[in-house]
Image (cartoon, coloured by chain):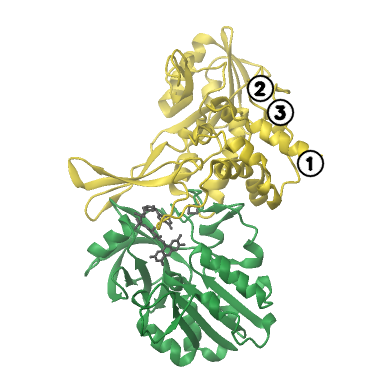
Amino acid sequence: MGYQIPRQKADRLFARLKQNYTIYAPKLFAGDGCFSDTDIIRYGKITDLDEIEWNRRSDYSFKEALLAINEVLFYFTEGETTVPPCPEKKLLIFLRSCDLHAVKRLDTIYLKNGAEDFYYSRLREKARFVLMGCWETCDTGFCASMDTNRSEQYDLYLKLSGSSLWADCKSEELQPYFAEAEGTVCDVQPDSVTENKEKVTLPRKLSVESFQNPIWESYGSRCIGCGRCNFVCPTCTCFTMQDILYRDNANVGERRRVWASCQVDGYTDIAGGNSFRKKQSERLRFRVMHKIYDFEKRFGFPMCVGCGRCDAICPEYISYTNIINQLAKEET
Amino acid sequence: MKNEYIPFPSQVREIIRHTDIEYTFRMSFSGSVKPGQFFEVSIPKYGEAPISVSGIGAGTVDLTIRRVGKVTAQIFERYEGSVLPMRGPYGNGFDIENYKGKELVVIAGGTGLSPVKGVVDYFCEHPEEAVSTTLIAGFKSPQDILFRQDFERWESALQVIKTVDSAPEGYRGLTGMVTKYIPDLPIVDVSNTDFITVGPPAMIRFTIMEILKRGVPEQNIWISHERKMCCGLGKCGHCKMNDTYVCLDGPVFNYAESKHLID
Ligand SMILES: Cc1cc2nc3c(=O)[nH]c(=O)nc-3n(C[C@H](O)[C@H](O)[C@H](O)COP(=O)(O)OP(=O)(O)OC[C@H]3O[C@@H](n4cnc5c(N)ncnc54)[C@H](O)[C@@H]3O)c2cc1C
Ligand code: FES
């Protein structure tokens, strides 16, 4: 149901939500960008509606709310292992339509590819999603081309505009908060863009022959293997295991999984000095083919949601959208 | 829900020493398991290593481990009378049914013999279930030969070609790469002959070339792939090739279905 809620009452509503939910949303970290005098927008816990960055796309995605950058799987002492408890509170995650579509990709890997993942699944059950609208396109995104510019799968849609909070609540669980917020019932439709500056056509005739395309070398030769494209991507899910020992007691430590990048050295190294993708061009090919071909072949829909973050973050200005469009053009 | 990441303790029941750096660890395990599947041996503080099942007994599985680095060194340092944490089994493994009633040729290089050893053992105990069973096993040198006691058993029931790449003068056994013995293999009916080949990537490549020269159909060839694996559960992504996860869909693959896989 839709509501218009005056700002003061909205703050009270938010305070009540906060009691029962840990709230993750994109925040502006002024001056924290990679270059001097630049900002960065990434996810963090918030306690106030005004902490949310409503206008600009976040540089990093929401995924760290469900998949921590490093996540303790268990603590160990000499003979025992202890699994850290799941946070008790439920999660309320603010995100845009492209990212909400990415949740389906994360679910696919962590819940459907083989057995369900214990850690993901216990957090995912607690996660509720708050859609943030997009009223104008971001610079590098191409959600309209990927059909991810709209989403119906939200629990709640929120928009802060003028002196009101506009809401569309689909979730029964959240409904009581709105019923008692003393807002006006009205029709609220999520803002969404229908066109982006960047337009992408997915190649539809890719095959194993595409692996031999010279395009990988021509773009990949510029890649420095920093892995940022993976870390900002809302659908990249790889991790590496890491055992950590505590300095004050070498018998005690923890096993973690930490985000991994298929672009970075070591990703395919096995004992005996073998490694399967030594060249950056092979790694770039691996990433792009996964996003637009391999994943779809396995699960029936493309992995990429068109958020455009990888193009925005690349220090070498390697354009993923150009690669895709060129591959599509070669097919005509 | 089961937390797959937590290893269970498994008792080391017996150690079989093959070489200085290759031992078989007979571990207690009573679940269902197939040859060619693997366990993650999981040593807190040091990490995990995927290791193939090299033998299956009553209440035990064998893991034949080559000491090459951090985790495997720990296994060698601490096994005596001990318990090793592990998790698994993972992967598809070999399906014995595929090879019954066939002429079966197993070609293995070095520790590559581990994952297929269960298949060889099976047809050694039930030779009548295959038309014939041949094992071609290659090792670097006479010192590197694994499973010496098993070879005695196998040689009495199967056709066995045990070869070393190079040997000191006076060595009485066979020498040369495994590929050298493929052209002269007696094969009655290529369409009813299955090959299994496991070993280093280069060995697999050349072996398949030789097998194909014999006119064996691609779908009669089986391989087991080794890739980096951090989970064994289809989550970490490291083992992926094209749309295939080696840990879930493999490590055993039919050649006809997997030859298009590119890293
Ligand atoms: C399906 C499969 C079956 C295998 N079966 C056997 C076997 O029966 N016997 C045997 O001796 N070896 C086997 N291996 C290889 C064995 O897993 C590696 O030798 C072992 O992981 C090396 O670990 P390490 O820490 O001792 O070596 P290091 O070189 O110190 O390795 C450091 C780290 O690299 C990683 N690593 C290295 N190689 C691999 C690998 N292949 N897969 C995943 N991670 C790796 C590990 O995370 C390890 O912690 C198998 C590998 C695979 C994928
Ligand atoms: S080993 Fe992790 S996905 Fe296969």
Q: Identify the residue at horizontal 39%, vertical 38% (top origin).
A: A70
Residue neighbourhood size for the residue with mark 3, other residues' Cα within 10 Å, grouped as few (<14), some (14–19), many (≥20): many
B9 and A70: which is toward the camera: A70
Residue A134: give x, y in percent of width and height: 64, 20
Q: Tag 1, which chain? A: A
Secondary structure of the residue carrying tag 1 is: loop
Q: Which quadrant does the N terminus of chain A fall into?
A: top right
Residue neighbourhood size for the residue with mark 2, other residues' Cα within 10 Å, grouped as few (<14), some (14–19), many (≥20): many
Can you tell which quarter of the image residue B219 is in?
bottom right
Badge 3 amino acid: Ala
- Alpha carbon distance from label 2 to label 3: 15 Å
Q: Identify the residue at horizontal 47%, vertical 88% (top origin).
A: B125
Can you identify the residue that label 2 sits on?
Answer: A190
Which is nearer the N-term, disc 1 or disc 2? Answer: 2
What colour denotes chain A?
yellow
Badge 2 amino acid: Pro
Q: Which quadrant does the C terminus of chain A fall into?
A: top right
User: Does residue A142 appear to the left or right of B20 in the view shown?
Assistant: right
Can you identify the residue that label 1 sits on?
Answer: A331
Which is nearer the N-term, disc 1 or disc 3? Answer: 3
Can you identify the residue that label 3 sits on?
Answer: A144
Q: Is residue B91 above or below residue A293?
A: below
Badge 1 amino acid: Glu
Q: Which chain is green?
A: B
